[in-house]
Amino acid sequence: MSVSVKDVEHIAKLARLRLTDDEKIEYTGQLNNILEYMEKLNELDTDNVSPLTHPMEKENVFREDIVKESLNRDKALKNAPKSNDEHFLVPRVIKGSGK
């Protein structure tokens, strides 16, 4: 499979890119080199190779998930500049119909 200048023009149009004639020729060559390399990789026998989810096998490095009591509402709102005894009150940052 190979890519033509017309293919590059189509891809550029889809990506909303403006390319010069020199760039079209350059990218055509680069894409064809990539496809050539992929064809070479397709020649490899991978029948007895198991799929990987990650290139390096690692154990979970996260800490144990231990359930702890959360901060109660009163303590959380204690130092809030503004609250309504249930929620933090913050300035509106999104304009809208606002009720």
Image (cartoon, rainbow, N blue to C red):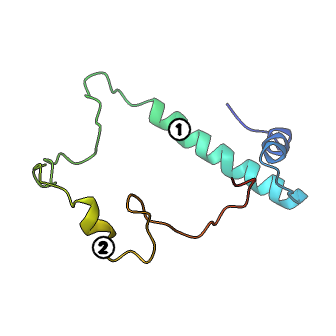
Give the residue at the far right of this rendering: 21
Q: Identify whether 18 is placed above or below 15.
A: below
Give the amino acid at mark 2. Answer: Lys
Q: Quadrant of residue 63?
A: bottom left
Residue 84 in the image, given as x and y percentages of width and height: 44, 63
Residue at image location 64% in from the left, 66% down from the top: 93
Residue 81 in the image, given as x and y percentages of width and height: 43, 78
**Are there few (<14), some (14-19), or many (20+) residues within 10 Å of tag 1?**
few
Q: Quadrant of residue 14?
A: top right
- Residue 38 is tagged as 1
Residue at image location 24% in from the left, 68% down from the top: 75
**Callouts 1 and 2 close, C-beta under 8 Å:** no
Distance, label 1 to label 2, CA atoms, is: 61 Å
- Residue 48 is tagged as none
Q: Which residue is mark 2?
A: 78
Mark 1 or mark 2, whichever is nearer to me: 2
